Image (cartoon, rainbow, N blue to C red):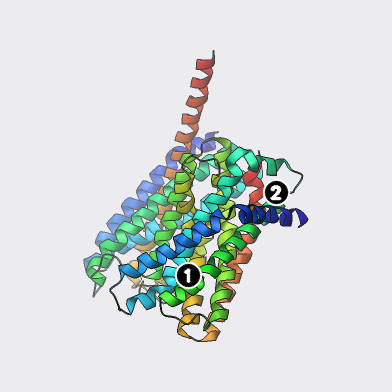
Amino acid sequence: MRMKKIIDWSLPLAALFFIEAAIVLVLVYAPVERSMGIVQKIFYFHLGSATAAFFSFTLVLVFSLAFLATRAARWEMLGLAAAETGVLFCTLVLLTGPLWARPVWGKWWVWDPRLTTTLILWFLYVGYLVLRQAMPGYKGAVVSAVYGILAFVDVPIVYFSIRWWRGIHPIVIRKGHIGLAAGMVPPLLISITGFILLSLALLRERAAIERISRDIETLSRRIIHE
Amino acid sequence: MKAALAIARKDLVLELRGREVIVLLSVFGFLILTLFSLSAQAGSSALTELAPGVLWITFLFAGVLGLGRTFDRERENGCFHGLLLSPADPVQIYWGKCLSTLVFILIFQALLWPLFTVLYGFSPVKGLFFSWAGFVLGDLGFVALGVLLSSMTIHLRSREMILPLLLFPLCLPVLVGGVRCTTIALTGGAPGLAWIWLGRLLAFDVIFVSLGTLLFPMVVEE
């Protein structure tokens, strides 16, 4: 119990600390990219959000499997929370991308495979949330867990998309090699850490809210019956 | 396997008596192909380039309508409950529904294919093998996903809207692979590339059919 309390306050604090540090490092320490200029700095938060989104979607898969195996309500609430944070960060990816693309590519959006598949990914998990909304209760929990597993099949496709069809989306991290100036790496890593911690903090918060709202529902139903 | 065949046979016999799904779907598909041709400038080459994509989008739209209709039939009078109560294994029910839906879609495609080739200026016999290999493999993935999702949403009030919302993004690999196969077949591209895409479609079929087989019993349990 004490351990849980410690995580309760330390996780959001750590997330806050890393995100703040990332902002300072990106703005002050990181070198300005030669051809793209100051716009390139969006990239740190773009990739950070992308990592958090993929991380959350992976958690949806893990929690869905855990729920189907154990049928314990907590996994299902965590799965729902992970899908919501995933959609949140995926939305951020889809917003920060065009902000960068407009000055660099001259267009807000192009139908590049990486972009298209990421958008499809967003649709998939919005679908998950719609399904969950439309079907409350235990049955809905089972069905959304099943959908959470199916949807994850697309995640590797997004990853392979840039190999199957050559697009124009830049590939930053290749096998054992980062295509970045040395000064850009620490802010990037701090930013990624910050976003992952933030997604975890939000996930726990969201799951707690879900648990409380269900408790309220059961209690109010009991009061009505009495 | 016997139960699966019996369920598929039941659906096919029902369809043979009423003939509503396939006839409606074919007219619907014909209509979509016609409307798409109006959306491009008359005589422009854009339509020829888009044709395989148009064809596959038509398949997806018609497919989701067909799924909705066959599952409506099961919902009426609680037939689906009856099926689940029968001694047939849920996996058999899943395979049976997949099989009958697959046959429906293939018949629909066989009816639409000559219309499509004539309307969009292709030869109906050239590239027949790769187009149809793509159809069969693509349909299998579509059906494996579609039947699973239809049984997930069968009791929802807004299922007509939710089913395509859930199904279409999942069908991304089927759509991409199918369109590539049809494009190569119609434009006479390298057969090696067509084989690669057929291989990928087959891989997706294996993934989706096994996921469906594993997950369907959980979806329908009470």
Q: Name the residue nearer the viewer: A74 or B170.
A: B170
**Does residue B121 appear anywhere in the picture?**
yes
In which image quadrant can residue A181 be found?
Answer: bottom left
Residue depicted at 39% across the width and 65% down the height:
A116
Q: Amino acid at mark 1?
A: Val
Name the spot of residue A58 as percent of width and height, x first.
52, 55
- Quadrant assignment for the N terminus of chain A: top right
Residue depicted at 52% across the width and 40% down the height:
A77
Residue on which the image places disc 2: B90
Residue most extreme to the top: A226
Residue on which the image places disc 1: B176
Q: CA distance from mark 2 to mark 1?
A: 31 Å
Q: Label 1 is found on which chain of the structure?
A: B
Mark 2: few/some/many CA within 10 Å (<14, 14-19, 20+): many
Name the spot of residue B36 as percent of width and height, x first.
36, 67
Q: Which mark is residue B56?
A: none
